[in-house]
Image (cartoon, helix red, strand yellow):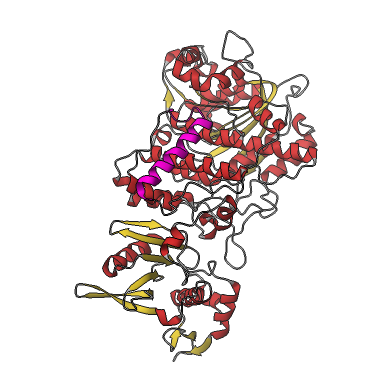
Amino acid sequence: MTIYDILKDSAYKTEQFSQTSIDNLNGRIIEKTDKKGKPYAVVECLVRKKQITLKPEEVVRQLLIDKLTNDYGYPLSRMQLEYPVYFGREVKRADIVIMDEDRPTVPYIIIEVKKPKLKEGKEQLKSYCNSTGAPIAVWCNGEQIAYYNRKDPNYFEDIRDIPKATQTLMDVISERWTIEDLKKNDVLQKDKISLKDKIKDLEDEVLANAGVDVFEECFKLIFAKLYDELMSGQNKSRYLEFTNAGRTEYKLKEAIQDLFNAANKKWKGVFDENTKIMLSPSHLSICVASLQSVKLFNSNLEVVDDAFEYLMSKSSKGEKGQFFTPRYVIEMCVRMLNPHENEKMIDTACGSSGFPVHTIFNVWDKMADAEGRPKGELFSLDRKPDTYTEYVKENIFGIDFDEKAVRVARTLNLIAGDGHTNVLHLNTLDYDRWDETAKQDDWMRIYHDGFYRLKDLQRDKKSYREFDFDIVMANPPFAGDIKETRILGRYELGKNEKGKTQNKVGRDVLFIERNLDFLKPGGRMAIVLPQGRFNNSSDKYIREYIAERCRILAVVGLHGNTFKPHTGTKTSVLFVQKWDDVLCPRKDDYNIFFATQQKQGKDNSGDKIYIKQSDGTNALDGHGHLVVEQDLYNHDGITGNGIAEAFAEFAKKEGLSFFQ
């Protein structure tokens, strides 16, 4: 019997421990049988010096004892197990306690393993530390681990690690890191948690009672930290500034405000130039401690995207039926439309800018291949060649009517595009009022450059109706109707068969027509639509409108969980190419690619499902990212070929212009 047999189907894992520790514990296991002949495992406890039954939580405790002894240097004599903690007449037992070196009867570090979920474990630790006065707390279930410093009864501040036996707590708190240190110790990978979970914890414990706008304050901190990582990435010897580093709370607030100001100066048009961090010094200290060991920069933006999706799910995005598109769906769409370096692309409902950013990375990949350059991490800290940034500046555009979404999109696009972005705060459907918007000084100061690049692509310089884009990708809002006759009257799909303006039309329907107007002849589009648009008899006129103007390339049915937890609406992605004498000659009869997603990607709660390895741990791609279980495209060979690869074969066989 091994510890893997014991942990099977439990909430406890072994990912936080070395193979040597695991092998050592396996070697100490003694197998016995109970009165019914059922086998069970025992082990001689290193601290209690007696045989203990090895249940899942005991496996983690024994591995932690080994780790504390061999990695941190704590002698067994300083450890007590099942240490009594008194709450009036009630007595509870702390799993592992390391006693103070100079005061052997006083707890120094309390470790919790009985509660396999972090939230419950942290609550237990709080009560133990408040009762005993212990300054350090640790929670671990073998898969994840978290370290805390008890500042006062209300607030427990994250720390990067616990001190070794030869260190003090201040040694850990005041340690300065370079970007290389952060890469090696990234808490998201090391402790198997997400930035979204970090923010949820902060919201529950600090931000909800801080009297601030949670979205704005988290956005400011992420913004400042991205800048800090970028500066250290471009100067590898520079120490990161986004850290408590033993500073007083007031000195820390000054330092983080200075960092934010520098970021705001570099990446203009996201925050007002005089914006201040509104968190109190004590609240800010806890937030910085929680985020300082998180590496935000990675190769696909998913770390920050998940966090922003959570933050924005409480704002107006969800009410307007507009949700962040999962990155695996975006990647499939980009691969199927196969963008090239000389092509111009726009997302007309860009949200957090997923389609534009993945288009950038896809084209940069091709540019790197053509030049024989190593690809590395495209969303990395290194400066990009001028040709790469020029491509972004001249070719990639985004529009959204939600101001918060635009600010998020601009941030991610500015960083991915190395300082360039054409993300604009406009109402895509109400294009008649764009000039009115452009007359506002505040708006023009932010969006001037991108707006004039967009104007260069107008088909008719007197109208914003038609443009000359090669590619349009969008997941438009599909909840709610447009009822303004002033807007509806501008659209063919806003009128009935007799040419009379309808009373109301679904937003997504108008986006179909609007997106096609953005495309030049031969241009191609991917658009996420409710499944009903493909099936409902009442929507036949929409399908006829599309078929008259385009070749229908493909329809990909997405799983019903794709946009959970926000909505369970069943959706499909429609891919079309506008008729053109050269690029897409008109045909009456042609083949269409149909596919349906089989591997769901998310569970019924809307949480992503990740691929597991044979030992039960999560599979990681070449950049150390978790791999979603999906069949939309081949993710680093881990998922195998999917729908995108099948479509590429179809496109070549059909002689489609963009795959020749």
Q: Which of the pair 48/486 is nearer the observer?
A: 48
> Residue at 66% across / 53% down in the picture?
622
Q: Which of the pair 628/16 is nearer the observer?
A: 16
Location of residue 9 in the rendering, given as x and y in whole percent from the top left corner:
50, 70
The answer to whether 512 appears left or right of 289 in the picture is right
Q: Which of the pair 591/110 is nearer the observer?
A: 110
Give the quarter of the image for residue 271.
top left
- Asked whether 260 falls inside the magenta stretch, the response is yes
The answer to whether 391 appears left or right of 158 in the picture is right
Taking 560 as reference, is 449 above or below it? above
Location of residue 356 in the rendering, given as x and y in whole percent from the top left corner:
60, 33
Q: How many marks?
A: 0
Range of magenta residues:
248-273
Residue 227 visible at all: yes
> Residue at 65% across / 30% down in the picture?
392
Location of residue 31 in the rendering, given as x and y in whole percent from the top left corner:
52, 88
Q: For the N terminus, give its image quadrant.
A: bottom right
Q: Which of the pair 34/194 is nearer the observer?
A: 194
Location of residue 266 in the rendering, given as x and y in whole percent from the top left corner:
53, 32
